[in-house]
Amino acid sequence: MSSMAKVAAFEVLALLIAVFGFGWHLKTVYSGFVASTDQGDALFERDVLEDYGQQILDELIRQDVKTAIISRSGQKREKLPEGVMFTHSAFFRRNDQGGYDVYNLYHGEENRLISSLVTDRPADFLRLLQEKDAGILIPDAATQDQLYDFLESPEYKAVHQVNYSLISNPFDLRFQNCNEFMLYVVAAMFWETTDTEAIRQRLMKTIEPNKLKASPIRRHIGPKIDERLIMEDHDGEILTTTFGTLTQLFEREGRLDTSYVLNFTEP
């Protein structure tokens, strides 16, 4: 083999290694970024998760909160994309027993491209927690009351898109993840419509989603490594919804009481 052919072969091999390596990077990092699932190996023991869940409840009870949005990180923060603190979000709604029910969107396990709406407990919500904190978004009192009723109305489920994507674009209606679903729920409640196209059009004038950076090669290889990394709904930019996007919507609609990070204390 000539020296030129050897150089060419080496460059091809290096490119394949780099592409495959970044594919695994997408799988391990971006899959943790917005993975809407309650399945997987827990980092913390169940009693620790129960204690952390109670700390969230104590915070909400202390402030007499009826409904809130809570986010947790299912990936170590240093592995998350720039500007992203949390990965999975859910609605917390006070129940008759003095606790809170958690309203989630989770993708399936047998078919990870289909999602369903699941109500569980705080410790279940925290099952895949990787960082010892949670994002807390508390609407103003009137919005809490409105959200309390909305979560049990047919309109809540009406904006659910079952086709799941890890990094779905909130300005495209073909796919959805947990944070985008919540964005559309809140928008449907604010603007009194379940017409998702009308919501999409208004969101485009109201919010600025998070932008994720990826080269054309990385965008191409990602879906081959993890089928949940769908790129069909992204054109020039990769846009997705985060806890910060949700906070942004509440702020711009004048519906936010407070938004902050709760650091858990050791049990």
Image (cartoon, helix red, strand yellow):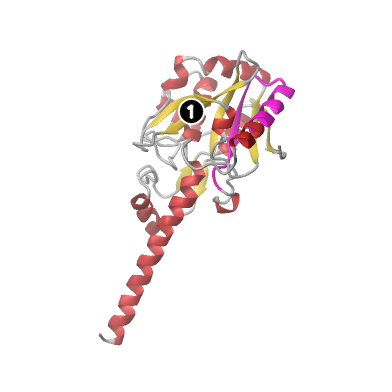
Q: Position of residue 84 (x, y in %)?
A: 57, 46
Q: How many dots with numbers?
A: 1
Which element is circle 1 on? helix
Does the magenta-highlighted stretch encompass residue 61?
yes
Q: Which residues are magenta?
A: 53-75
Tag 1: residue type? Tyr
Residue located beneath label 1 in the image: 184
Q: Nearer the viewer, residue 42 or 264?
A: 42
Q: Position of residue 59 (x, y in %)?
A: 71, 28
Tell me: residue 262, above or below residue 24.
above
The quadrant holding residue 149 is top right
The quarter of the picture where the C terminus appears is: top right
Tell me: residue 200, above or below residue 61.
below
For the view shown, which residue lies furthest in the left direction?
A: 1
Q: Position of residue 182 (x, y in %)?
A: 51, 29
Q: Residue at x 37, y 46 (%)?
A: 231
For the view shown, which residue lies furthest in the bottom direction?
A: 2
Q: Position of residue 248 (x, y in %)?
A: 60, 35
- Asked whether the viewer can see residue 207, the reply is no
